[in-house]
Image: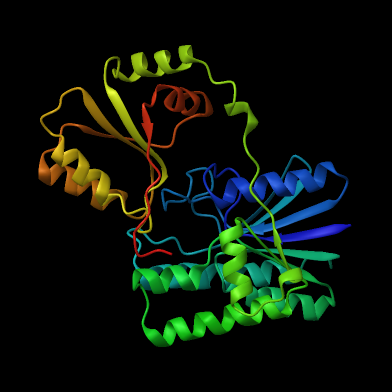
Amino acid sequence: MKVMILSINYWPEVAGIGAFTTYRAEHLAAAGHEVEVCTTFPYYPEWKVSPDYAGKLAASEERNGVRIVRSYAYIPNPVTSLRRVLHEASFIASCLVSAVVRKRPDLLLVVSPPLGLAVNAFLLSRLWRIPYVFDVEDLQPDSAADLGMLPSWALWLLYKVENAAYRHASLVSTLTNGMRKRIIDKGIPEEKVELLEPRMDDSLIDIGPEEGRAFRQCYGFENKFLATHTGNMGVKQGLDVIVNAAALNRSDDSMLFLLVGDGASCGRIQGRVAELGLRNVRFLPLLSAVDYRGLLAASDVCLVTQQKSVS
C-alpha cells in the first residue's frame, strides 16, 4: 500500500511530533509499504531552520525507506499568535502544492497540528478518491481557548474546521484516553476514534547510575540536587512556576533547577531568570542521545509542568 503522510514536523527533529511521525513512517516502510512524507524543513523546537536546510524553498531526500518531500514554511522568531497563524498557513499552502503533484497514494495520514491540514486532507482525498486518517497530537482549538490566544471569531472558525476534519475522516486517532474522550464528547462516534499511543523508547529502561555520574562530572553538577525540565519550552508548559520555585530557593546552594531544550518561551524565561539574578537555574540546549540518557540518570526530580488553564 502507498501511504502519504502530511506532517509539519519530521526527522531530523528529535522532540515531540517530529519524533513520533518519523517512527511511524519508518515502521510502515519497514513493514513493506511505500511511504512518502510531505513536510517542511526542520525548525522545532528552536524555531529556526537547521543550517543544513537554510535558504531552500523545496527539497527531496530519502531515509530508512521513506521518501521525504520538503516545502517552504515561514518560521517566526519570536513566535506570536499572529505569526504562528502565518507559519501554519504558509505550510498548509506549500504542502498542498507539494502533495498534489505526487503520485496518487492509497491512504492519507494527516498529522494535526496544524489543524488547517484538514483542508488539504479533504481536498486531496476528494481529488484522489481515497480515505484519510486524521491523527490528533494536540487539541489545538481547546488549547488556544484555554490560553486565551485567539479572538472568539478565530476560535469559532477553528472549531468548525476541527468538526469537519473529524466528520470527513475515515478514522481519527489520538494519543491518550483523555484526548480520545474529548473528541468523542464533540459528537464523533466512539468506534471512529482510535487510541494510537506514542511508542516508549525502551532503550531508556536500562540507564545505569554510571551514566548519571558521567553527566554530572561533564557539566559540573557533581553534588547538586537536580530538578530538571526537558523538552519544549512553550506557552503551555507554564515554566514560570519553576522560576518562582527557584526564586524561593535562591539561598539553597545545594539545589539546581535545570531547563533543557528550547521553544517559543525560552528567551522570555531566560530573561526573567537574568532579571531575578537567579544563580540556581541553568539552561542547556537539546542534548545528544548519550547526554539525554545521562541527564535522566542524574536528575533527582524530573518536572512535567503545564499551565493550569490548559485542560
Whether 29 is drawn above or below 164: the answer is: above
Whether 29 is drawn above or below 86: the answer is: above
Asked whether residue 247 appears in the rendered view, the answer is yes
Whether 228 is drawn above or below 35: the answer is: above
Image quarter in which the C terminus is found: bottom left
x 71%, y 59%: residue: 5
Asked whether residue 112 appears in the rendered view, the answer is no
Image quarter in which the N terminus is found: bottom right
Residue 144: x and y, percent?
A: 42, 71
Q: Nearer the viewer, residue 248 or 266?
A: 248
User: Based on the displayed image, in which of its 4 quarters is residue 59 positioned?
Assistant: bottom right
Residue 245: x and y, percent?
A: 21, 42
Residue 108: x and y, percent?
A: 76, 65
**Is 190 situated left or right of 159 in this image?**
right
Residue 77: x and y, percent?
A: 35, 58
**Is 51 situated left or right of 60 in this image?**
left
